[in-house]
Structure formats: C-alpha cells, structure tokens
Amino acid sequence: MVETQPALALPKSGFFSRNRETLLRTLIPVCVVICLVLLWQFIITVNSIPQYILPGPLAVANSLYNDWGTLAPALWVTTQITMQALALALIGGVGIAIFLVQSKWIETAFYPITVILQVTPIVAIAPLILIYAPTTQVALLICAFLVAFFPILSNMVQGLKSVDHNLLNLYDLYGASRWQTLLYLKLPSSLPYFMTGLRIGGGLALIAAVVAEFAAGSAGAGSGLAFRLLESQYRLNIPRLFAALVLLSLLGVVIFAITSFISWFFLHRWHESSLKREN
Amino acid sequence: MTTSQAPLMPAPGDTRRRPLVVMRGVSKMFSSGTLALSDMSLTVEGGEFVSLLGPSGCGKSTALRIIAGLGDVSTGTIDWPSSRINSKGLPEGDISFVFQEPTLMPWQTVFGNVYLPLKLRGVSKSAAREEIMTTLATVGLQDFADAYPRELSGGMKMRVSIARALVTKPKLLLMDEPFAALDEITRQKLNDDVLRLWRETGITVIFVTHSVFESAYLSNRIVVMKARPGRVHADFPLKTSMSRDSHYRTSEDYRQACEKVSNMLLEAIGGEEH
C-alpha cells in the first residue's frame, strides 16, 4: 500500500502535475492514519493484548458492523440533538445579537446575562434542566443549545459592530431605513464573523450534546451515543465503546466539514480569508 | 465658466441663478471639545466646481460632511434654496458623496455596488439595469459589472465609487480627498474623468483636497481654509480661457493659478504657529 501510493502522486501527466499539491495534501494525512492503524493492530497482535483492555482496529470494525443495530439509532439521536441545538443556536445567537446591538443600553443591560449563561459549566446546570424539561431529549437539546449559542452570539455582536463607518455614513446619506441598513449592510458585513461562530458552535454543540447526556444518564430507546459509550464501559464491551467513539469523531468531522464548506461557499467570492494569497 | 462671487442676489423666480447650498455661520464642536469649524459661511452656485483646500485639521472634511448631513451643526444653518427638502432637512436625493476610500461593499459585485442608491430607493434591479450600465460606461467600467471589488485596482475601485455617486443623477457631488491614496498617473486620469463628467452633466462639485495642483487644475473656485479652529481664509474664482486638459497642465495659465493658490495656502498656514 505504501509503495503504490507515491507512484500515483508522481507528476505523470498534466493533470497530476497541476493537482500534485492537492493530491499530496490528501494522500499524506490518509497514509499517516493508515500507518497508525496498522501499527495499532500490529502492537495488539504482537503483545496479544486482551480485547477488554485495548481492542484492535479489526475488533472495533467488527463491533461497528455487529452492533450497528444499537449504534445507528444512537448515532441518529446524537446527530439530531446536535443539529437541532445548532439550528436553535443560530437563530437565537443571531437574533439576540441583532437585539443587543440596537442600542448601547440594551447591550449594557443584557450582555452580562449571556456571559453568565456561558461561563457556568454546562454539567452543573444539566441536573437542573433535567428537572424542568419535559423529556430528557429536550433537556439535552437545551444544554447543547446553551453551549453552542454563545460563540455565535459573541461573534455576531462583534461582526455587527465592525461595519465600515463610511458605508454606514453612505447608507445614512441615501436615507436607508434601519431595516435596509440591517439587511443590506450589517448582516452581509458580519457574515465572516457569523461563519467563525458557526464553525465553533458546530463543534461545541456536539461536545455539549455528549456531555449533557453523560450528566443526564438517560437510558432506553431514545438514548444517544454518549449513553451507549457509558453502557459499553459498564459491560466491559470495550470494542463497542471504541466503535461509539469512532462514530462520534466521524460525526464531529462531518459537522466540521459541512460548516467549513458553508463558510467557504458564502465567502470565497469576496472575503480575504477564503482567498489564496499570491505574491 | 460662471464667476460666482458669493453674495450675488438671484433674480426672483430664476431658479438657475438661485444658489444650490448656502452655509451661514456654521460652527461644529466635537464631543471631545475640539472646535472643528468656526463661523463658516459659503454659498455655492449651481454648476460650480469648488475646491476646499487647506492643511490637515482645517475642518474641510468636516465642512463637507456637514453639507452632506452627516453630523449636526453646533451653530449656524445650511439652506438648499433650489431643492426640495426631506424630513431630515436634506435635499431629496440631490447629494452624493465620494469618500477618500472607495467604500465599496466587498460582498457585492460592481453592479451591486452601483445599484445600492437605487435599491435603497426601492427601484427594482431590472428597472435600474440600464441606468447602471450607462453610468458604468461613463467611467469606463461597463465590462466589469460582474467583477468583485477585490478584483479591481485602486483606481478602478474609485471609479466604481464615482459611478455609484452619479447613478442617482445628483445636483451636488461631494468629494472628500477622493484620489489622495492613488498614484500620480491614476490620479491625473481620474481628475480628467471628473472634469469631463462635470462638463457633461453640469453637476456641482465640492472637492476637498490638500493638493494645490489638484485644486488649481480642477476648480473654477477655490476656498482656502485655515486650521485651529477651521475657518475660511480666502475664497476666490480661478478663471482660465483654456479647456482643462493635458495642455492646460503645462500652460502658463496653470502655473499662475498654482502660484496664486500656493501663496494663499502659505498665507493660511503662515498665520499659525507650526
């Protein structure tokens, strides 16, 4: 495997020479991961480490396949909670940010509250939320929302306040209404900030969904990957624990990829952060 | 060229001879306590090309912004004798402003940027298209309608900014050191463009600059200002029988104009401690 890959990357034709850097950028990390996995399997086999201490990649893959019936619904639940929390955080973060920047006094009055919400550890409020929320799922959703929404809010506030003053003057000059200024100037202008918030918030929503489920310790049909993780640990089913872990990382990677793509999609035409520097 | 010594009384009913904007005893105090402008009076007739010239801190940009309605006056009044006034005390759609930076929206194409003033008035994109393309053609950018600002050079961005200012067909164009950040060649080119547009459209221009040569080349009236506090030092017409083009740049007329303006500016600076 390692011998065949470099041959592919060699600039044989025009296509490969043009895309050589892109190709290497993909191949190198993939090769490193494959090597590490091979090394992992090798160490397990050579030292004959028992599965309940450290399962090999083969055992994990096996468990992924065999336990898919239990893991898939859990993955779906965690994905749902994360995505719903992120969606709510986007609406809430942007909405509250717009509300906060309407006047200096509104910001002075309400910003501290949002900070308090943010700095209080989510694990500490989770039991309380569990009491008030009608179902565990709702409680998890609230926890994940609270964590994900703050980076979106604070980035958005920063973005809405960083609008070019001359452009604001220009809008004033042409008699733009508050609504027009918000829609045509402030929102597009804060898009790069929003995208930063989205990427951070996406990652945090998943983390919060898992942490909150640990805290909630819910069980049964509607439980997510975090519960399956704990359950596997109690039952010393370490391969399945690893399988759940793999699924969580994959979910995280997918969220990261999607949010990065969204960011690229909206900014690549005009924003410096998405442009390649050429000197 | 009209030689408009300020206090010419207009014949009643003759809107052409009514001044476009009249500033009376305008002062501006910033919240920091700085007196940016002190008792400034200025009457601008329609069709004039007025340069506000002076050292930095003389309040020329402040004066321009006050005329544009950006920021209130501390004392004094501004009248628009020949315009319809809107609720904010500004002439309805008659002013445009070109800033020192191009001040374009980076997320909009050239077309979108020029469309902005019309969009804010509620004109639909299809209705505005022809007007926008015509305006872009007058600044030589008809082929760049779909380009984004980052793809343009500094001079081209400035042209977009000028096109945006002209698309509403304003009576008064306010320019705040618009070409100060550009290289000499681009600057001369854009000066010629502005002169051409001024001649073709009959628009009134108030042009803030700190360049003696630029003001002498462009304007038919120069207002020299003094700093600390900002006030008018001299206000005189610049007449020339020549058309202002590349020949004018090397002519004796232009040299004399530069000398006159330069002396006035030195007087204005000389009156204060350095």
Image (tube, grey):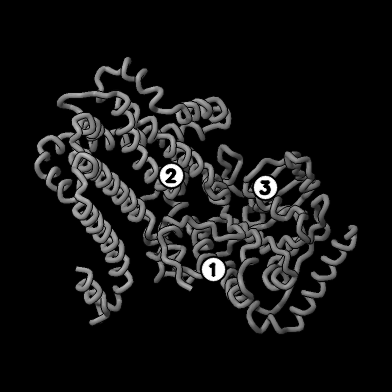
- Name the foreground residue: A62 vs B3: A62
Where residue B67 appears, x then y in whole percent? 66, 49
Q: Disc count in the image?
A: 3
Question: Closer to the camera, A90 or A180?
Answer: A90
Q: Is residue B63 above or below residue A66?
A: below
Which of the two discs, 3 and 1, labels the residue nearer the N terminus? Answer: 3
Residue B120 visible: no
Q: Do discs 3 and 1 share a chain? A: yes
| Numbered label attached to residue A187 | 2
- On the rendered structure, is B164 left or right of A227? right
Q: Which residue is mark 1?
A: B154
Chain name for mark 3 = B
Task: Say what secondary structure mark 1 lies in.
Answer: helix
Q: Which residue position holds label 3?
A: B66
Residue B126 screen position, x and y as percent: 33, 55
Label 3 – label 2 distance at C-alpha: 28 Å
Could you say where residue A166 lies in the image, as x and y percent from the top left? 57, 51
Label 3, label 1: how far apart the Cα atoms are: 27 Å
Q: Nearer the viewer, residue A96 or B145?
A: A96
Which chain is indicated by disc 1? B
Q: Which residue occupies 64% across, 82% down?
A: B246
Q: Amino acid at mark 2?
A: Leu
Give the residue type that dot 3 points to.
Ile
Query: Which quadrant of the structure image shows residue B112?
Result: bottom left
> Of helix, strand and loop, which one carries label 3?
helix
**Mark 3, residues whose alpha carbon is within 10 Å: few (<14), some, or many (≥20)?**
some
Q: Which residue is farthest front?
A: A47
